[in-house]
Amino acid sequence: MCHLKIRGLIIMEKDAIQNKTINAYPTKELFISILTRDVTLRDAIGDLLDNSIDGALRLRPDNNYQGLYVKIGIDVKQNFFKIEDNCGGIPVSIARNYAFRFGRPEGAEKTEHSVGVFGIGMKRALFRLGKKFEIISTTHNSSFTMEVDVEEWKKENTNEGNQADWTFMFNDLKEDMEQEFPENERGTSITVTELHQNVIETFEQENDITILIKELQREHLFSIDNKLEITINGILLKSQELKLAASDFFKTAYYENSEGQVKVKIYAGIGEQEKYGDNGGWYIFCNKRLVIGPDQTKITGWGIKTPIRIPEYHSQFYRFRGYAFLDAKDPKELPWNTAKTGMDLDSPIYRSVRLQMINLMRSVMDFLNKLHEETKAVKHDKIDETPLQKAIDQSPIMELHEAIGKRDNLAKLFGFPEPAKSKQSISKQVWIRYAISNKEYEHVKEYFETDKQGDIGRRTFDYFFEREIES
């Protein structure tokens, strides 16, 4: 009798707790809507590619990806998207406990220096692309297949606790096998069908595929350089080489900080002068994945007034090249956003890095300003020699790893030759003096980025002479 009474009390207690419980579980529809709202198709596909590259890193920690591939196929007429790789596959135990969780749970296996961060990329990408997906994955001793109909999964099925069932199911699996799968069979294949209408409309445009190729090959240039073969609709992605001018004439501006969780290396110098300057600016890498670049905005210091004045990006600075590398064992320590498309501008780490970038950039700007002045001085027959242009002409443009290979070619600030001195003697010159208001002077001083009154007077005269006399 006593046992029955205790059991009855327990049941009553549970009922009382359930009566007081308020259901705050999100609906799957809302969750998916929030998860995919701000992610672009390019970012979604980029997340899936990131997963493959992390697999390659686990398989080859030395970063030698010779023989590994990632194949991406997009066919809107056949209504499917597919990405497949031979980068080691997803173990059944990881798929069961971690890979399909929404977020990265405690205890999840980590890949050091990876680009997978928050545990949402693959799921977000699959929901963003279409209504059905199939995943087939094989490792050395396990394999699984799963098929998901997202519309069916979104329905409010409940488990025994009357809570929404957020689980997926394997269709087939093998694990802890004694006989290993051959290495060439180890990898993952993801196929998405019944693509969303906006996905179809986007990739019906051939130009959008071209843009996707350009962006992904730029983002993953390090992996491509390390022999990972990435193709999109059969087109092999080629890496854009990072380059700097290097010779005894120049010292590449350099900063390094190996303390703390995030290691930082920054380089700034000059590259080729391009007609439109599309490749000039800053490139920021997190764990060897390009996050920003080439950037020519205030995000990386262009057009700021404090703490150091940096001009807006324009033709005079098309030669500028800056490369910042941030590396962390735990990718969560890196100051980037969840889509890995931008930096966290409020992060103390990024604010510190940006300050160093600005300092190095200013020294390169000083050279490019003097180069511009040298060009004008030659035009006006004020100098006989052009040491700055000569230094550029005699400095080959090298791949970054070659340019920075010699430590004696690096310096705290960008180093360059002394400019030529004017050949005009004082007796042949005419002094011009005039007075202006402080307010007018401040505006002109800011425009020319100098507070030397003689320089400002000279440059305002040149400005008039070039436009009104020579024209």
Image (spheres, rainbow, N blue to C red):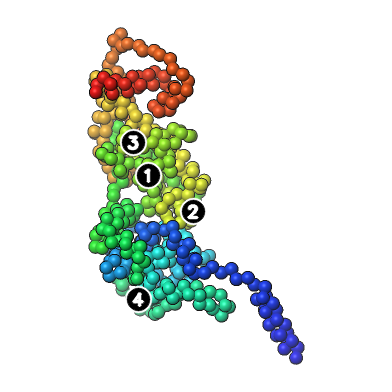
Q: Earlier in the sequence, mark 4 or mark 2?
A: 4
Q: Quadrant of residue 170?
A: bottom left
Q: Earlier in the sequence, mark 3 or mark 2?
A: 3
Q: Look at the numbered disc 2 and give the secondary structure of its residue.
A: helix
Q: Look at the numbered disc 3 and give the secondary structure of its residue.
A: loop
Residue drawn at 45 percent across, 56 percent down:
338
Residue 423 percent across, percent down from the top left:
27, 16
**Label of residue 180 in the image:** 4
* Real-space CA distance between mark 1 and mark 4, rounded to the nearest whole angstrom: 47 Å
Disc 2 crowd, CA 10 A, few/some/many (<14, 14-19, 20+) = some
Q: Which residue is mark 2?
A: 333
* Real-space CA distance between mark 4 and mark 2, rounded to the nearest whole angstrom: 36 Å
Q: Which residue is mark 3?
A: 314
Disc 4 crowd, CA 10 A, few/some/many (<14, 14-19, 20+) = few
Residue 210 seen in this snapshot? no
* Extreme-top residue of the structure: 427
Q: Which residue is mark 1?
A: 295
Disc 1 crowd, CA 10 A, few/some/many (<14, 14-19, 20+) = many
Q: Earlier in the sequence, mark 1 or mark 3?
A: 1
Q: Quadrant of the C terminus?
A: top left
Closer to viewer: mark 3 or mark 2:
3
Asked if the residues shown at circle 2 and circle 1 are in contact, with their CB atoms under 8 angstroms apart, the answer is no
Closer to viewer: mark 4 or mark 2:
2
